[in-house]
Amino acid sequence: MVYAIPTGESESYGENECQHVVKEGWDDAEHTEITEKIKSVGLKLQEWGGGVNNEYKQKIGVCRERLRKLRARRDTHGISTYNAVRWEFLQLLEKQEIYWKQRAKQFWLKEGDQNTRFFHRFASSRRKTNLIQRIKDSAGVWRETPEEIQVVIEEYF
């Protein structure tokens, strides 16, 4: 199930959908440990957002093809259609860049480095580095099993 922000609707639509997906993932794991709830939410968010980049790629490809076909036209309707498709194309590129900014969570992306392989790799690697493999409890002892990690987190909060 992939949710997309329809053209012309506000960005809060996407935020509302995200909140709905998080709530759904949390509720699906209702009578489980916190780590399972977090996994459930993560899987739901991954499912929800996984198709976003592919959707952008498809729409950008369609716009490029339309622009290629419209480029040769010199009549008034062709020119206005070309301008409308070009505007849509630029909006899609901007939304795709915002997607990668959010995924990478890095301020230096806003400097104009649009969708390079480096940034895609960096964003994908963040998922690996954000995994908690062990945690030190209040006594200074390292805890490594998911159950021990959960206890330390629950005691902290």
Image: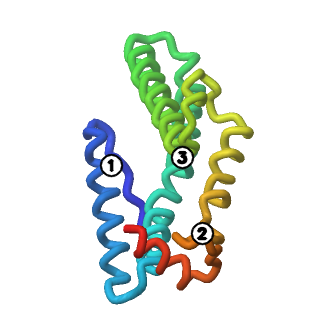
Q: Residues within 10 Å of mark 3 (few under 14, many from 20)?
A: some
**Residue 154 locus on image (x, y percent):** 41, 75
Task: State the residue at coordinates (55%, 26%).
Answer: 110
Question: Which of labels 2 and 3 is toward the front?
Answer: 2
Using the image as rendered, state which of residue 31 and residue 51 is in the foreground: 31
The residue lying at 39 percent from left, 11 percent from top is 76
Q: Quadrant of the C terminus?
A: bottom left
Q: Earlier in the sequence, mark 2 or mark 3?
A: 3
Q: Amino acid at mark 3?
A: Arg
Label 1: element kind: helix
Which residue is at the front of the view, 54 or 22?
22
148 vs 83: above or below: below
Q: Is residue 122 depicted above or below 116 in this figure?
A: below
User: How far separated are the C-alphas under marks 1 and 3?
Assistant: 15 Å
Work out which residue is located at the far front of the displayed protein and give it.
139
Q: Which mark is residue 136?
A: 2
1 or 2: mark nearer the eye: 2
Residue at horizontal 39 percent and vertical 87 percent from the top: 32
Find out whether the residues at labels 1 and 2 contact each other: C-beta distance under 8 Å.
Answer: no
Residue 34 locus on image (x, y percent): 42, 78
Left or right of 21? Residue 123 is: right
Q: Which mark is residue 2?
A: none
In the image, what residue type sits under mark 1? Gly
Q: CA distance from mark 1 to mark 2?
A: 37 Å
Is tag 1's residue or tag 2's residue first in the polypeptide sequence? 1
Q: In the rendered image, which quarter is residue 113 located in?
A: top right
Mark 1 or mark 3, which is nearer to you? 3
| Quarter occupied by residue 72 | top right
Q: Dot 1 corresponds to which residue?
A: 14
Which residue is at 44% across, 11% downward?
Answer: 75
Q: Which residue is mark 3?
A: 103
